[in-house]
């Protein structure tokens, strides 16, 4: 097999002329989410769970936002995406050992303090 100059023969998916995949903006995931939103499966699932059909407004907003980013300059897009990433709250709450212990006691102490009333009268 012949390899042309600039081809990515390493299999990493990044050619020497392209930016890393992380910094490239793709709206495919937003389009896929919008497409799935209008599927009968999703609509019936929403109807079953919430008693209402989904109007997919959030999916449209996400797709339009992505398409709007596509027409901006690269440095603007990088700054906007970085700001969005920084503004997201972390999934975990970091606590010291003392804070974690207090939180655990506040949430689960009732299971430890319950009298053993489930035993029969002959116990």
Image (cartoon, grey):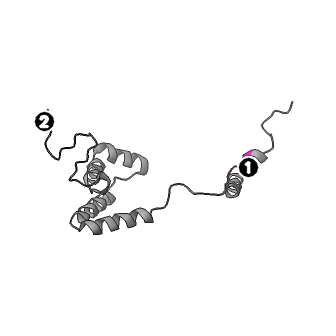
- Report x, y in % for residue 92: 54, 54
Which residue bears the numbered disc 2? 2
Q: What number is the disc on residue 110?
A: 1
Q: How crowded is mark 1: few (under 14 residues within 10 Å), some or many (20 or more)?
A: few
Left or right: where 76 falls relative to 84: left
The structure residue drawn at horizontal position 43% and vertical position 64%, both measured from the top left corner, is 86
Q: Distance between the residues labelled 2 and 1?
A: 70 Å
Q: Where, quadrant-wise, is the C terminus in this rendering?
A: top right
Indicate yes or no whether the magenta region holds residue 110.
yes
User: Measured along the vertical axis of the image, is residue 76 above or below residue 18?
Assistant: below
> How would you classify the magenta stretch by its main secondary structure?
helix
Q: What number is the disc on residue 62?
A: none
User: Measured along the vertical axis of the image, is residue 100 above or below residue 8?
Assistant: below
- Report x, y in % for residue 14: 25, 47
Using the rendered view, name the quadrant where residue 11 is placed. Answer: top left
Element carrying mark 1: helix
- Report x, y in % for residue 60: 28, 59
Q: How many marks?
A: 2
The structure residue drawn at horizontal position 50% and vertical position 55%, both measured from the top left corner, is 91
Left or right: where 16 falls relative to 47: left
> Furthest-front residue in view?
5
Using the rendered view, name the quadrant where residue 80 is placed. Answer: bottom left
Q: Where, quadrant-wise, is the N terminus in this rendering?
A: top left
The structure residue drawn at horizontal position 45% and vertical position 62%, both measured from the top left corner, is 88
Using the rendered view, name the quadrant where residue 12 is placed. Answer: top left
**Which range of residues does the magenta coloring cover?**
107-111
- Report x, y in % for residue 122: 87, 30
């Amino acid at each position: 097999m012949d390899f042309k100059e600039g081809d990515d023969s390493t299999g990493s998916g990044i050619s020497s002329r392209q930016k890393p995949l992380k910094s490239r903006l793709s709206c495919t995931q937003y389009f896929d989410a919008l497409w799935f939103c209008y599927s009968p499966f999703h609509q019936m699932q929403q109807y079953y769970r919430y008693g209402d059909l989904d109007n997919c407004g959030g999916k449209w907003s996400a797709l339009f936002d992505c398409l709007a980013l596509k027409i901006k300059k690269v440095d603007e897009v990088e700054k906007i995406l970085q700001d969005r990433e920084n503004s997201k709250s972390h999934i975990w709450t970091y606590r010291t050992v003392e804070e974690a212990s207090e939180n655990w006691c506040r949430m689960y102490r009732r299971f430890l303090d319950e009298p053993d009333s489930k035993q029969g009268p002959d116990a």
